[in-house]
Image (spheres, coloured by chain):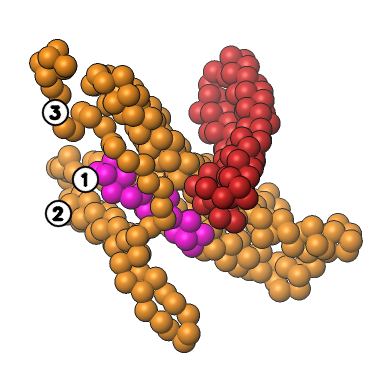
Chain colours: A orange, B red
Amino acid sequence: MQIMANFAVPKILEGPTELSVDGANIIASFKLFGITINFTETVVLEWIVIAVILGVCAFLTRGMKVQGVSKRQVIAEMAVETVTNLVRDTMGKRWLFFTPYVATIFCFSIFGSLISLLGLRAVTSDFSVLLTWAAITFILITATKIRFGGIGGYLKGFADPIPVMLPINILSEVATPTAMALRHFGNIAGGSIIMGLVYYGLASLCRMIGLQIPILTVGIPAVLSLYFDLFSDFMQAFIFIMLMMVFISNAGPSEEETA
Amino acid sequence: MDMSEAIVLAGSAIGAGLAMIAGIGPGIGEGYAVGKACEAIARQPEASGAVTRTMFVGCAVAESTGIYGLIIALLLIFLKPFT
């Protein structure tokens, strides 16, 4: 006991003392036409993310010049050029008007996931957020199909190649956005739960043996956090926009057919 | 703790473990895809950008079955159905 007093560690290095896995906290709920609508903390965090993105954009694009460009402008130009090249390579030249939308979803996903580094709840670990993005993608895919094939062509596509395939085609149409949303949600939510378990487990281990070892309570989780919080966030945002671009551009005829 | 409740808890814990068997498939599939991508890059180093991009998207698609298993396992552990 006497030895332990000498090795007193700061409170923050002791690790968590409890583990809780819950959905987003409900701040307020109100009834509308008999349906209860919950106002969760995700909505608040989303508005914070939107404000941060707006602030960064406004900061980077302030006072743009043709000659004698500032460092800020170079960064902004580089970002826009990267996204434009990505869209051109993946979707083709005639889909370039999609660039702002792709960049928006990418920024929202990155900032929404990285907000968990501040100890807040990641926006993307709420399934409704991902389902919303997937629903937008589904509408875009359907709109593209109707735009290039007409309503008749769109409906006929369900009976392709033989009418017996109708149920399978309808299922695959719905499965595309659902799988996209579930993949992103599963990765982020699963990662945060695994990180919570690691933090809690190692802290309990330390408490059990009665010795505070900072490398167990903070060191090992910090290394794991690099993968689960940083790498996986960037990867999932990238994969989400890649799949979105591929699905939307595949909904229309290929470039050679129309040229 | 009630006996029936204990059985449900044990059942959901075992079920969560069984659900994670779904992790085998994506593991094999992704390993195969990455191996092939390495071969392709070794043969054509100038196409490494396109190969890597395609590989990551393919890996993500292959991973989704594993993610479904993970979600089911997490639901079974943390939501504790029927209790």
Membership of A174 in magenta stretch: no
On screen, A259 above or below A135?
above
Q: Quadrant of the C terminus of chain A?
A: bottom right
Residue B75 horizontal side relative to residue A161, left or right: left
Please state which of the two labelled residues, at mark 3 or mark 1, is closer to the viewer: 3
Q: Residue at x 45, y 45 (%)?
A: A189
Q: Amino acid at mark 2?
A: Gly
Q: Secondary structure at mark 2?
A: loop
Q: Amino acid at mark 3?
A: Pro
Residue at the left extreme?
A6
Q: Which numbered disc covers residue A186?
A: none
The answer to whether marks 2 and 1 mark residues whose Cβ atoms lie closer than 8 Å is yes
Q: Secondary structure at mark 3?
A: loop
| Whether residue B72 can be seen here | no
* Mark positioned earlier in the residue sequence (2 or 3): 3
Residue at numbered disc 2: A63
Q: Residue at x 37, y 46 (%)?
A: A20
Residue at the front extreme?
B2
User: What subunit carries mark 1?
Assistant: A
| Whether residue A178 can be seen here | yes
* Mark positioned earlier in the residue sequence (3 or 1): 3
Residue at numbered disc 1: A73
